[in-house]
């Protein structure tokens, strides 16, 4: 007799670890530490991408030849649920370029896992957002790396800034939690004060910022990288913001 994976319904009714009242699902309890629970999982579901980012750490563009098929991907979510995962973020490449991305969201939510996507938002249409909302998607994080000219240049596609801001507003209107992440490169600092105001106006409640590092495509574009001496200005700016 071979072992079989539990169905989504079977796993969903298992007793769940209880997050203390008022705490985020990412809050780690003593039990989480003792059992090495993967509380929050970020899953790069595909390398397929419709942007051409000069700083992409994964060198995304074409899908991997050996990416998980739909059955394997759903089974992976079942395994994560059995391990106690409470939050799952789907990333890429561009997660919605997987044909089964809605099924991945639906399976994750069937397990009671908080589910979000991180996106560049190019061609994140109303139809795609509506399908994701219906499947239970709870959050969306949009990558915005500066004001329009800089963002479009770094992302490699004209108009990508406008699409990113539009996606924030439309996701917010559908009741999703909305956040932004920004790569800080050599030219970004001057954009940050106005960018912060713009993303707040678009509905973002969280802003993740990180320094662009020399990996992936950024290795081939060293002019993007923040130089060490620039930190003397950037860190106080971030503190003020």
Image: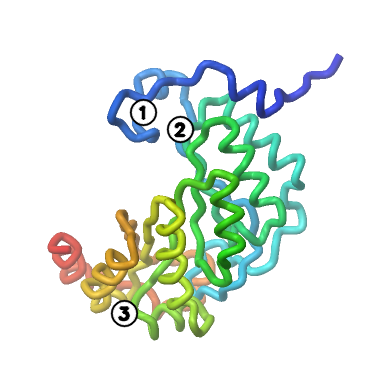
Does 143 sit above or below residue 162? Answer: above
Task: Give the labeled residue for mark 1.
Answer: 28
Q: Which mark is residue 39?
A: 2
Local secondary structure at mark 3: loop
Q: What crowding class fits label 3: few (fewer than 14 Cα within 10 Å), some (14-19), or many (20 or more)?
A: some
- State if disc 2 and disc 1 touch (CB < 8 Å): yes
Task: Give the labeled residue for mark 3.
Answer: 187
Residue 229 appears in the picture as rendered = no
User: Total marks drawn?
Assistant: 3
Q: Is residue 18 left or right of residue 85?
A: left
Q: Residue at x 70, y 62 (%)?
A: 63
Q: What crowding class fits label 1: few (fewer than 14 Cα within 10 Å), some (14-19), or many (20 or more)?
A: some
- In front here: 232 or 177? 177
Does 162 sit above or below residue 121? Answer: below
Q: Position of residue 54 (x, y in %)?
A: 50, 75
Q: Quadrant of residue 106?
A: top right
Does 119 sit above or below residue 197? Answer: above
Q: Residue reaching furthest top?
A: 1
Q: What crowding class fits label 2: few (fewer than 14 Cα within 10 Å), some (14-19), or many (20 or more)?
A: many
Local secondary structure at mark 2: loop
Q: Nearer the viewer, mark 3 or mark 2?
A: 2
- State if disc 3 and disc 1 touch (CB < 8 Å): no
């Amino acid at each position: 007799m071979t072992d079989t994976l539990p169905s989504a319904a079977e796993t969903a009714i298992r007793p769940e670890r209880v997050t203390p009242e008022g705490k985020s699902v990412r809050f780690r309890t003593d039990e989480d530490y003792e059992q090495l629970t993967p509380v929050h999982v970020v899953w790069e579901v595909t390398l397929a991408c419709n942007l051409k980012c000069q700083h992409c750490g994964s060198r995304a563009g074409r899908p991997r030849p050996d990416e998980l098929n739909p059955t394997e991907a759903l089974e992976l979510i079942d395994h994560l649920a059995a391990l106690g995962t409470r939050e799952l973020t789907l990333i890429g490449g561009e997660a919605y370029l997987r044909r089964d991305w809605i099924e991945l969201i639906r399976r994750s939510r069937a397990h009671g896992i908080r589910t979000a996507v991180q996106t560049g938002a190019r061609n994140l249409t109303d139809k795609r957002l509506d399908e994701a909302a219906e499947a239970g998607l709870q959050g969306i994080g949009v990558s915005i790396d500066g004001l329009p000219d800089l963002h479009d240049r770094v992302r490699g596609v004209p108009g990508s800034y406008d699409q990113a801001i539009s996606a924030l507003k439309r996701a917010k209107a559908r009741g999703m939690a909305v956040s932004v992440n920004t790569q800080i490169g050599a030219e970004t600092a001057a954009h940050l004060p106005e960018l912060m105001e713009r993303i707040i106006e678009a509905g973002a409640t969280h802003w993740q910022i990180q320094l662009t590092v020399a990996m992936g495509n950024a290795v081939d574009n060293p002019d993007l990288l923040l130089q060490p001496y620039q930190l003397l200005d950037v860190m106080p700016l971030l503190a003020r913001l």
